[in-house]
Image (spheres, rainbow, N blue to C red):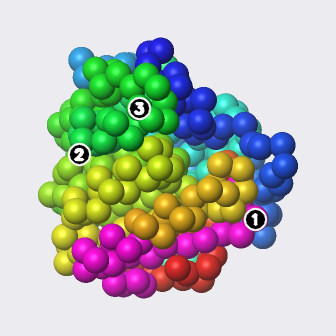
């Protein structure tokens, strides 16, 4: 893994240490997710083994009516870094989770989103970067990445195997075990930072599987935006897909805006319409942490799951 260690040094962990000059975002108790430090609802856990990726836990959050309605089937949201979604005790960096369970409980109760199953796939700290780095961009943009990193060993990259694991192994298991709606229009994927990159890679590589993707604080500065160039002509069909992007202004996110602007230009060129099947939001004062993502998670959830272009952040 030494070839990819250089990548970790520039902040590709889920929540890298903030810069000393930056201001940490604090959890806002008045947001939809609130400040409850615990698990809301039912979360089931199992261990997934595969020849494609390292063994990892998977957590499944079940919507409120799941136990009482055996005939109902539910859309599914797949999320990366599953250890950071529901339980603050598992969150390694800030000891706050995303509050996915709290946010969805409120949004479902208020009728803002449909009931949904959330599948949180844990990451392995030793393999997270190779699993999440868009693999096919490696050979095409290797010179750009080597300029930044020095060493850049293509043989270490594993995102294609990770996506194969998600699509061909995990998803069939989830569909066989739980009351899911398995089609593309009912299957979403979302993550932050490198998890944002692998979410965009997933919907680009498997547009027949994933109909919606959420890219939160996406780490586009790699190789001075080489991944933006890679994705520019590989986006899924805007007639059948929905994309959400956002970024903050503090810590790692302080350098994201110009790269996200380039990505937005590519999204528009591909035929996406702002507020319809795509939105990008800038959140002033938000840093690169689960605290910040918790404060605004209701925005991507409503856009992805219900197509609702709700207020939150600055529309780009």
Q: Which residues are magenta?
A: 264-287
Front position among marks 1 and 3:
3
Q: Residue at x 75, y 42 (%)?
A: 18
Marks 2,1: beta carbons within 8 A? no
Residue behind mark 3: 146
Residue 232 sits in which quadrant?
bottom left
Please tell me which residue is depicted at 66% across the width and 37% down the height of the picture.
16
Asked whether, in this view, residue 180 is left or right of residue 56, the answer is left
Observer-side mark, 2 or 1, equals: 1
User: In this rendering, does residue 19 appear at all?
Assistant: yes
Quadrant (top left, top right, bottom left, bottom right) of the N terminus: top left
- Front residue of 72/246: it is 246
**Is residue 6 left or right of 223 when viewed as pictured?**
right
Distance between the alpha carbons at the discs numbered 2 and 1? 39 Å
- In the displayed structure, 300 sits above or below 294; it is below
Q: Which residue is mark 1?
A: 285
Q: Give the spatial CA distance, label 1 vs label 3.
A: 32 Å
Label 2 vs 1, first from the N-terminus: 2
Q: Identify the element where label 1 is drawn.
A: loop
Front-most of 29 and 139? 139
- Local crowd at mark 1 within 10 Å, few (<14), some, or many (≥20)? some
Residue 4 percent coordinates (x, y): 46, 24
Where in the figure is residue 219, as x and y percent of width and height? 51, 49
Which disc is residue 107 wearing?
none
Q: Position of residue 278 (x, y in %)?
A: 38, 76
Query: Label 2 near label 3: C-beta < 8 Å?
Result: no
Q: Report the residue marked by disc 2.
A: 175
Residue at the spot 49% in from the left edge and 61% down from the top edge: 259
| Residue 121 seen from this side | no
1 or 3: tag closer to the N-terminus: 3
How many tags in the picture?
3
Q: Quadrant of residue 164?
A: top left
């Amino acid at each position: 893994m030494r070839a990819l260690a250089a990548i970790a040094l520039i902040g590709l962990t889920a929540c890298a240490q903030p810069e000393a000059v930056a201001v940490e975002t604090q959890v806002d108790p008045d947001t939809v997710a609130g400040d409850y430090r615990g698990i809301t609802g039912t979360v089931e856990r199992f261990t997934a083994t595969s020849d494609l990726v390292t063994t990892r836990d998977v957590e499944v959050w079940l919507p409120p009516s799941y136990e009482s309605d055996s005939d109902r089937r539910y859309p599914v949201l797949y999320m990366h870094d599953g250890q950071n979604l529901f339980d603050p005790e598992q969150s390694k960096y800030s000891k706050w989770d995303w509050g996915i369970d709290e946010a969805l409980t409120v949004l479902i109760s208020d009728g803002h989103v449909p009931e949904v199953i959330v599948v949180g796939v844990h990451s392995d700290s030793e393999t997270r970067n190779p699993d999440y780095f868009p693999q096919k961009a490696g050979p095409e943009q290797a010179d750009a990445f080597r300029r930044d990193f020095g060493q850049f060993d293509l043989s270490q990259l594993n995102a294609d195997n990770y996506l194969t694991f998600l699509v061909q192994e995990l998803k069939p298991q989830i569909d066989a075990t739980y009351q899911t709606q398995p089609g593309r229009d009912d299957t979403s994927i979302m993550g932050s930072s490198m998890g944002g990159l692998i979410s965009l890679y997933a919907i680009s590589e498997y547009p027949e599987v994933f109909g919606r993707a959420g890219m939160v604080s996406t780490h586009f500065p790699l190789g001075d935006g080489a991944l933006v160039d890679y994705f520019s002509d590989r986006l899924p069909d805007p007639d059948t897909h929905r994309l959400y992007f956002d970024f903050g202004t503090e810590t790692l996110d302080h350098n994201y805006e110009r790269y996200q602007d380039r990505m937005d230009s590519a999204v528009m060129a591909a035929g996406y319409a702002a507020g319809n099947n795509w939105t990008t939001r800038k959140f002033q004062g938000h840093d690169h942490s689960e605290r910040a993502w918790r404060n605004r998670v209701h925005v991507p959830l409503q856009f992805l799951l219900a197509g609702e272009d709700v207020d939150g952040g600055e529309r780009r």
